[in-house]
Image (tube, rainbow, N blue to C red):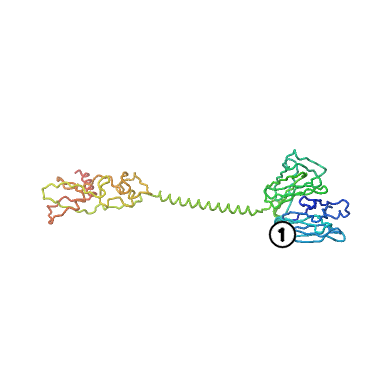
Amino acid sequence: MPLHNVTIDDVSALIGYYNPNGIPWKDSPANDSGLSGYWDQTYHSSNQSGAWSTFRFQGTAVYLFAATRWMHGRYNIFMDDQQVYSGDGHTPSSIFRQLMFNATTLLPGWHNLTFVNADPGLYIEVDYILWTTVMSAALTESSGTPIPYTLGNMTYDASIWDQNAPGSNPYMVTKTDGATVNITFNGNGIELYGRTGPEYGAFRRVYAQVDNYEPHVLDAYSGRLHNTILFRQDDFTDGEHTLVVTNRGNASLAIASAVPIIWSNAQDPHAGSRRLHGGLIAAMVVGLTLGIAVLALLWFWFARRQRTYRGVHTHDPSKIPVVYESAYEATPFTLPSTPLGEPTPPHTPGKYSNQGAQGVGYPAQYQALPTSPGWGNSAGFEHNSSLTGPLSPGFDQASSSSRPYAYNAPPAVYGGAGPPGRDVAAASLPQALFTELPTSLRDSDAGPIILPPAYSTAVVSQRRDQGF
């Protein structure tokens, strides 16, 4: 697809004409016999030294056309305030629609073309200007549905705007300083049509702005009346936009209609271009990065919370290691330390370092296991007080957590299974272990045999079952 070019006539409000002494440029003199040679039979000219014409556009190339004639002289061209060319428009005979200057390697963006008279007393002129837009070569431009000036299509204060319908070119006009009109449209650009002419005053200032883009100053003055394009701007993203036009000074402003500009892909003529401005792309990248970062932080927090939860709530008392004591472990027996026939005094249970706890103390092998709840610092564990049994006795919850819990069991009595008819005093295991043995042993001297608790219980149960 070729790049898109736009052509405007010399009477458009997009082109400004100025003179140092304030003398207006001439607009298509009716007595010029060569008028028919100009594009659309119009042109603007000035023979004032230092007179200049300006055109601001958004594009990549620009072309200035005029006629060369016997009364024309030298001129200078400035691009973006830099002089880039000097030319001479003099020829012995008139040659129309001549290319006076062109720039074809401009960077995409906004540029200013200025055309200055450098030969006092001789003329320079403008016939028409063509420029290349920034639209991609892969796209095509088409016009949307025209928007008439009537209320409901445009927004304005009807009390300060007058409607005029002369023939096929109806328009509305205002003379109020500050009067505005809002035009909402969908597309990639907009063209505004209206009128230029002498009745629009010497100050002829019109401001046009789309959304928050930079505003533009338009020149609606001309020596003759013309129905023409007042404003054009493009390169907008797809979607809805609003153009606001404001009249300034004591001049008049006339508006006829607006036409949206649609840039579409040749493969999809009904769809707008899918271009995204750099700022929008950057915003999308930043938003996506922040979203990923937030998700990563949430995942890290959730994983850490799950690990902490498992560490606190996976305690299972049934999985506590249990040390099983042998039920039939050999137990030493002691001989009486007094002569036969003398009563054996009762023994007082021995005291151990853990006797301060409730109940009777036991040797170390009967203390709470280091891996059991209640041993040392109990932080991070839960104690199930309902779990009791022969191998997992209950614990005293009133005891301090800084030391092992003692079993809540009655004092154990050893030797309860002695011979019938003979009184045997209860003896504690520690004292029995440390009783001094005599130097000589006889069968008759044998005292009560100390049996382990489990065995004694078994014998008593067996005799009870047999009726003893």
Residue 338 in the figure: left or right of residue 291: left
The residue at the point 19 percent across, 51 percent down is 432
Q: Quadrant of the C terminus?
A: top left
Return the residue found at the far top: 159
Secondary structure of the residue carrying numbered label 1? loop
Q: Nearer the viewer, residue 274 or 451?
A: 274
Expressed as whole percent of the image width and height from the top left, the position of residue 444 reads: 12, 52
In this orientation, does residue 1 appear? no
Residue 262 in the figure: left or right of residue 356: right
The residue at the point 85 percent across, 55 percent down is 37
In this orientation, does residue 234 appear? yes
The residue at the point 78 percent across, 50 percent down is 12
Q: Quadrant of the N terminus?
A: bottom right
Q: Nearer the viewer, residue 373 or 70?
A: 70
Instruction: Give the number of callouts.
Output: 1
Q: Nearer the viewer, residue 403 or 422?
A: 403
From this view, report whether residue 134 is shown above or below residue 208: below
Expressed as whole percent of the image width and height from the top left, the position of residue 56 reads: 74, 54
Expressed as whole percent of the image width and height from the top left, the position of residue 198 reads: 81, 46
In this figure, which residue is indicated by the disc labeled 1? 106
Instruction: Give amino acid for label 1.
Output: Leu
